[in-house]
Amino acid sequence: MSERAAPFYCPYCGDEDLRPSEEGTAAGKGAAWECGSCNRAFRLSFLGLLAKGLQRDRNEGGTTE
């Protein structure tokens, strides 16, 4: 996993016109992005793994019933 993963679309308007933001890129705060369409800024950060982890069903199809 890279330190700075890029989002594919804006979480507010859904547009793909995103640019990395120069502001707030301090270590540990997550990557800041700016949307050129809705003029909003947002930050992405990794929170951690779930305690349960991924649980797979033992059925062939992998679906739970």
Image: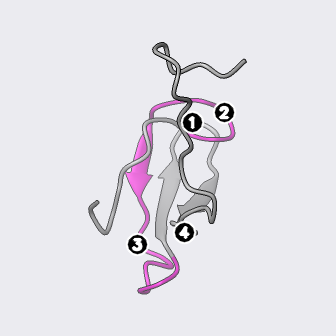
| Numbered badge on residue 1 | none
The answer to which of 62 and 48 lies nearer the viewer is: 62
Image position of 63 with respect to 32: above or below: above
Look at mark 1 in the image and give the residue it sits on.
Answer: 37
**Disc 1 secondary structure class:** loop
Q: Is residue 36 magenta?
A: no
Q: Locate residue 18, reporting x and y percent.
A: 44, 44
Look at mark 2 in the image and give the residue it sits on.
Answer: 13
Q: Which region shows up in magenta? A: 10-29
Please name the amino acid that badge 2 sits on.
Answer: Cys
Is 46 positioned to the left or the right of 6 in the image?
right
**Disc 2 secondary structure class:** loop
The N terminus, quarter of image: bottom left
Farthest residue, direction right: 65
Q: CA distance from mark 2 to mark 1?
A: 8 Å
Q: Locate residue 10, reporting x and y percent.
A: 56, 40
Q: Locate residue 13, reporting x and y percent.
A: 66, 33
Q: Locate residue 48, reporting x and y percent.
A: 54, 69
Sooner in the amino-acid sequence: mark 4 or mark 2? 2
Q: CA distance from mark 1 to mark 4?
A: 30 Å
Sooner in the amino-acid sequence: mark 3 or mark 2? 2
Look at mark 4 in the image and give the residue it sits on.
Answer: 48
Please name the amino acid that badge 1 sits on.
Answer: Ser
Residue neighbourhood size for the residue with mark 2, other residues' Cα within 10 Å, grouped as few (<14), some (14–19), many (≥20): few
Please name the amino acid that badge 3 sits on.
Answer: Glu
- The secondary structure making up most of the magenta span is loop
Sooner in the amino-acid sequence: mark 2 or mark 1? 2
Q: Is residue 20 magenta?
A: yes
Q: Residue at x 60, y 30 (%)?
A: 14
Please say if the residues under marks 2 and 1 sit with CB atoms less than 8 Å apart: yes
